């Protein structure tokens, strides 16, 4: 009987922990961070080559103490709606534990509440970032690494300040040149083979 009560109590605590830390809704978060990113709207970047510069700061119109629980700022690269359409693996969910909008981590930085200046970070786009249209979002995390605030470079409908990233082809220019040279050599060799065979045929007929 005591063992049964212990199991029930453990399940209750697990459920309570999940409610507190594992079931955060994006709609419950306040937009407290001002976030900007360079490139400009509509600009096209190349994975593995170009950089994204992100700046962030606490919104100065908010009351003092708004950021009292902030411990970390996490920057993430997020899919715009146009690149989520018909792609369930990029689907937006209000439950952050299930949300697939922001799958690419840029960086996580400790938050200093006493430093109200604008912070900046330059990120080289990783080579494995898929080709899509993106924006940048910043999450403020508390000591339990739970999201308690956010900011993003686009509007609430995610239609402004979007940029594109083109994935690398995985081919190097030297490989393309070698491929062209090999193809040309193959064609020349084929014609040379037919020429030799034709001459052999003529020599045989003359005999």
Image: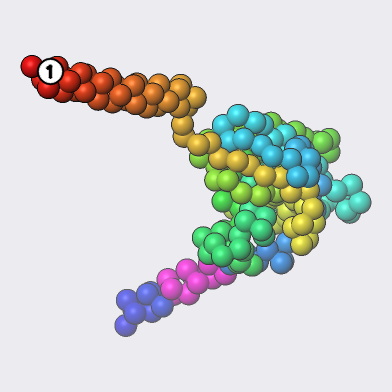
Left or right: residue 139 versus residue 184 is: right
**Residue segment shown in magenta:** 9-22
Left or right: residue 128 versus residue 125 is: left
- Magenta residue check for 76: no
| Residue 98 visible in rendering | no
Overall secondary structure of the magenta section: helix
Question: Furthest-front residue in view?
Answer: 206
- Count of marks placed on residues: 1
Q: Residue at x 89, y 47 (%)?
A: 60
| Residue 90 visible in rendering | yes
Residue 169 in percent (x, y) is at 50, 36
Image quarter in which the N terminus is found: bottom left
Label 1 residue SS: helix
Question: Furthest-left residue in view?
Answer: 207
Comparing 136 with 88, the one in front is 88
Question: Furthest-bottom residue in view?
Answer: 1
Residue 2 in percent (x, y) is at 34, 78
- The residue under label 1 is 206
């Amino acid at each position: 009987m005591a063992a049964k009560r212990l199991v029930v109590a453990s399940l209750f605590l697990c459920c309570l922990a999940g409610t507190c830390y594992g079931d955060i809704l994006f709609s419950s978060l306040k937009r407290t961070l001002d976030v900007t990113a360079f490139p400009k709207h509509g600009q096209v970047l190349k994975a593995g080559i170009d950089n994204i510069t992100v700046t962030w700061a606490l919104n100065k119109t908010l009351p003092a103490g708004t950021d009292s629980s902030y411990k970390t700022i996490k920057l993430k690269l997020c899919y715009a709606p146009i690149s989520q359409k018909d792609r369930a693996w990029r689907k937006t969910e209000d439950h952050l534990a299930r949300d697939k909008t922001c799958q690419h981590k840029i960086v996580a930085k400790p938050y200093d509440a006493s430093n109200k200046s604008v912070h900046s970070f330059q990120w080289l786009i990783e080579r494995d970032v898929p080709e899509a249209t993106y924006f940048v979002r910043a999450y403020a995390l508390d000591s339990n690494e739970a999201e308690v605030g956010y900011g993003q470079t686009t509007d609430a409908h995610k239609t402004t300040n979007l940029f594109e990233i083109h994935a690398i082809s995985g081919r190097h220019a030297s490989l393309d040149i070698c491929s062209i040279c090999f193809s040309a050599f193959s064609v020349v060799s084929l014609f040379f083979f037919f020429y030799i065979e034709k001459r052999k045929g003529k020599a045989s007929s003359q005999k």
